[in-house]
Image (cartoon, rainbow, N blue to C red):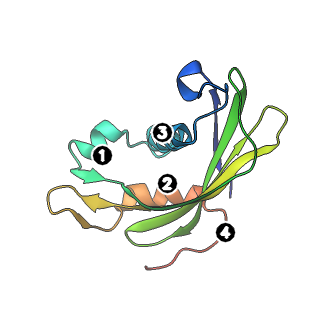
Amino acid sequence: MAAFATTRKILFQHCDPAGIVFYPRYFEMLNAVVEEWFDLELGVPFAELHGPRHSGIPTVSIDVQFKKPSRLGEEITIEYGIEKLGGASLTARFAFLGPDGDLRLEGRQVLVHTDLEALKPTPFPDDLRARMTHFLLEEDVSDA
């Protein structure tokens, strides 16, 4: 299947004095991409997820390899897809690509669907899970 893709312009707020992205800002951008993916593609804005659904989707693990810096003013493309979809968790792969398509960073992120009242993992609701399967990068849907 296909990954979700979106773009971001590197703004002054993302950069250190050298004019390159300060690495923690990539994590903020990644979180914004996840929120955008939920809203635009999965049909569940975070306001609904955290509000009426009383759920969250915290990151429990992240592994990143930084390949090349991104500079102020560049427009980067961020690709996000599911490598593994379990019962209450997913492992996503992501890549940040520069304007010329060169890899800036890549990695994996594990998200866990969580009941915000009990603060415990809970299975993905059927509607959300069904939409997530469209973003599987590999046909690996398990019961984990």
Amino acid found under the numbered disc labelled 2:
Arg
Label located before the other in sequence (1 or 2): 1
Q: Are marks 1 and 3 in contact (CB under 8 Å)?
A: no
Helix, strand or loop at mark 3: helix
Quadrant where the N terminus sits is bottom right
Q: In terms of image quadrants, where is residue 64? A: bottom right
**What whole-number distance in Å separates the C-alpha atoms at marks 1 and 3?**
19 Å
Lateral position of residue 134 relative to residue 65, left or right: left
Q: Which of marks 3 and 4 is in front?
A: 3
Q: Which of 106 and 126 is in front in this view?
A: 106
Label located before the other in sequence (3 or 2): 3
Label located before the other in sequence (1 or 4): 1
Q: In terms of image quadrants, where is residue 9? A: top right
Helix, strand or loop at mark 4: loop
Q: Which residue is at a point 54% across and 74% down the rendered structure image?
A: 141
> Crowding near pointer 4: few (<14 within 10 Å), some, many (20+)?
some
Which residue is under mark 2?
A: 131
Which residue is under mark 4?
A: 138
Q: In terms of image quadrants, where is residue 15? A: top right
Amino acid found under the numbered disc labelled 4:
Glu
Lateral position of residue 139 relative to residue 48, left or right: right
Q: Which of marks 2 and 4 is in front?
A: 4
> Crowding near pointer 2: few (<14 within 10 Å), some, many (20+)?
some
Helix, strand or loop at mark 2: helix
Label located before the other in sequence (1 or 3): 3
The label number, if any, that marks residue 49 in the structure image = 1
